[in-house]
Amino acid sequence: MRIIHAQDDPFMCRDVIPQQPLPTNIRYDLSATGGHVGFINGSLLKPQFWLEHTVPMWFQQQLQR
């Protein structure tokens, strides 16, 4: 399982960030920025979508196992 969270998410405040270690079957990715399900970097003319990079990287890691 994977949890994706941004520190600047207006709906999920910092209080929901886990303070205890999570089980090994849960991967928690905390990004400094991203807002609420946005995760867009880059510029207005050349946006970079976080999910478009992260999902293929995850599949590549799974295939290498």
Image (cartoon, rainbow, N blue to C red):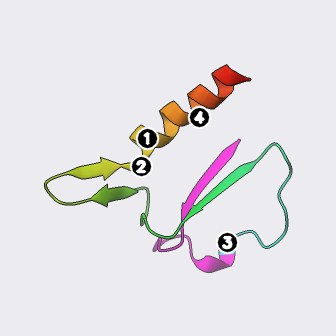
| Residue of label 2 | 50
Q: Residue 22: x percent and y percent? A: 83, 57
Cβ atoms at labels 1 and 2 below 8 Å apart = yes
* Callout 2 secondary element: helix
Mark 3 sits on what residue? 16
The residue wearing badge 1 is: 53
Find out whether residue 35 is within the magenta segment.
Answer: no
Report if the CB atoms under discs 1 and 3 are less than 8 Å apart: no
Q: Position of residue 32 (x, y in %)?
A: 50, 70
Distance in Å between CA atoms under marks 2 and 3 = 21 Å
Q: Mark 1 and mark 3: span between their CA atoms?
A: 25 Å
Disc 1 residue type (three-letter):
His
Question: In the rendering, at what x and y percent does residue 12 appear?
Answer: 55, 70
Check the image and name the residue furthest to the front: 64
- Front residue of this view, candidates 45 and 18: 45
| Circle 3: residue type | Val
